[in-house]
Amino acid sequence: AGYAGLALTLLGAQLDGPTWMLAGFLVTLALAFLLKGISETRQSLTVAVATTVAGVAWVGLGLAYVILLRAIPEHGRLAVFTVLLAVFAADTLAYFTGRLVGRHKMAPVISPGKTWEGFAASTVTAVLVSFFALYHQGFLSIWESLVLGAVIAVAAPVGDLFESAVKRDFAVKDSGRILAGHGGVLDRIDAHLFAAVAAYYTILALT
């Protein structure tokens, strides 16, 4: 049900934007309920269905908003690359700043390695990347590009912390084994899943 819902969510976003993206996502609920009803497992129906739907909402909708960003007229490709670069650059600067001068823990229980010093560095980085990527292309004004950078700077670490909280709940260190040494694919895109959604609505509000 989860894989089918994810595929339909992405297909809906590609074919006809937010409306069919939502329709594809809602199929997850019906499929999860149907399959749980005919299965022989004793797991709670509420927990099984809620977990499946939440997973598709997190990963499926997050990826679908990248497709919606790409569909923005004239500047869609630029918007996608700006989000990707801003998140990667901010995450890198946050890591090295935290290692070098980080003293104040940002979320000691969920993710002990994150610091407020690293967050400050990542915020400046995300804002600068967004400004240089977008303003000189005639897409957004100075203040609009700065606002977008600030939104990405906040949304990206929230996505990272959310994934860390999920892994802690499931008592696992990595989300997968495909990317050796990187913690799994989800560990690489967790911040983008939140940043893409936030960036999409911010750009709609600004343009």
Image (tube, rainbow, N blue to C red):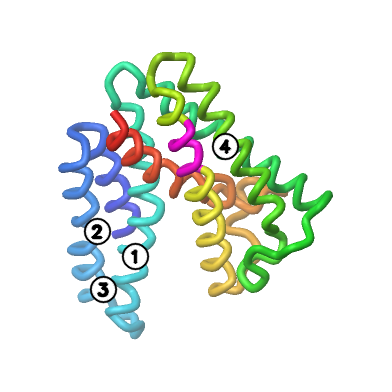
* Amino acid under disc 4: Ala
Q: Are marks 2 and 4 in contact (CB under 8 Å)?
A: no
Residue 206 lies in the magenta-colored region: no
Q: Amino acid at mark 1?
A: Thr
Is residue 126 positioned above or below 188 on the image? above
Q: Earlier in the sequence, mark 4 or mark 1?
A: 1
- Tag 1–tag 2 contact (CB < 8 Å): yes
Earlier sequence position, callout 3 versus callout 1 = 3
Residue hosting label 1: 52
Predominant SS of the magenta segment: helix
| Circle 1 SS class | helix
State the separation of the CA atoms marked 1 and 2.
Answer: 8 Å
Give the alpha-carbon distance from disc 3 to disc 1, as whole Å.
11 Å
User: Where residue 57 sits: x, y (%)?
Assistant: 33, 56
Viewer-proximal residue among 27 and 74? 74
How far is mark 4 from mark 1, CA to CA? Answer: 32 Å
Label 1, residues with CA under 10 Å away: few <14, some 14-19, many ≥20? many
- Residue 21, x across and y down, in percent: 22, 44
Spatial distance from mark 3 to mark 2, Cα to Cα? 12 Å
Outermost residue on the front side: it is: 143
Tag nearer the camera, 3 or 4: 4
Q: Secondary structure at mark 4?
A: helix
Under circle 3, the secondary element is helix
Magenta residues span: 146-152
Front residue of 123 and 113: 123
Q: Which residue matches tag 4?
A: 126
Q: Name which residue lies at 46% across and 25% down.
A: 142
For marks 3 and 4, give the CA distance.
Answer: 43 Å
What amino acid is labelled 2 in the image?
A: Thr
